[in-house]
Amino acid sequence: MNKPIIVEYFTDVLCVWAWVSQQRIECLQQALGDKVELKFRYLDVFGDTQKKIQNQWAERGLYQGFAEHVKNSASCEHKATINPKIWSHVQPTTSTNAHLILKAVELAYSSEKSNEMAAVIRKAFYIDAVDISDIRTLFQILVAQGLEKEKLQTYLDNGKAIATLMTDYQEAKQQSLKGSPTYIIDNGRQVLFGNVSYLILLANIKEHIK
């Protein structure tokens, strides 16, 4: 049996383009099945959202301007629902807590479960306008999905979750990744970045499968 093509999928959970890509990723997994293995990894785009908004959106309306940008960006994908409260009213302080707890899920359960929970956390923010920077809220979301808080807490307490996350952040910097989402296909043989359509993703991965 041939080994699956590895796609390292670097994102920030608060990145709207990763939200736009969520449906495409799910369709890709359904279309290719065990021919492709997606490895969800994280990079630091919204580590300090207040500083990011002040530095990049001070002359464009700050949070309100950014909220409009997010809504307009997501309009290219009709399934990428945007709650009007996000960024204008619900303003997460960081994406790092979400990344950290997803690494705890990966260590306590599996990569597949962590990937599944990443979609749940993104939906909580973009559809339900939940502040996913709050660690207590993140625990509530995951416990509602049947995960054990104590099991996750073990990997937060012993430092293994943060160590794994730092590996992702450092490798993203070492590879000079431009941002979220970035697709690294077949051990770096090809890198795709940004708002890449489903058909382009599918065609490129199929070529590597051949």
Image (cartoon, grey):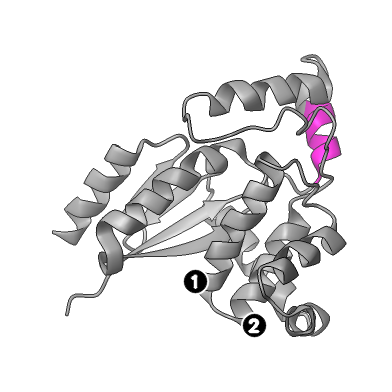
Q: Nearer the viewer, residue 180 or 146?
A: 146
**Mark 2 is on which residue type?**
Ala
Q: Which residue is mark 2?
A: 108
Task: Tell me residue 50's x, y (percent).
Answer: 85, 37
Can residue 81 be seen at all in this image of the molecule?
A: yes
Task: Tell me residue 191's x, y (percent).
Answer: 38, 48
Task: Tell me residue 111's x, y (percent).
Answer: 52, 73
**Mark 1 is on which residue type?**
Glu
Numbered-mark total: 2
Q: Which residues are magenta?
A: 48-55
Q: Look at the image and tell me in which quarter the N terminus lies.
A: bottom left
Q: Nearer the viewer, residue 187 or 116?
A: 116
Disc 2 crowd rating (10 Å Cα; few below 14, some 14-19, many 20+) is: many
Question: Residue at point 53% right, 64% down?
Answer: 115
Quarter residue 119 falls in: bottom right
Q: Which residue is mark 1?
A: 112
Distance (Cα) linking label 2 and label 1: 11 Å
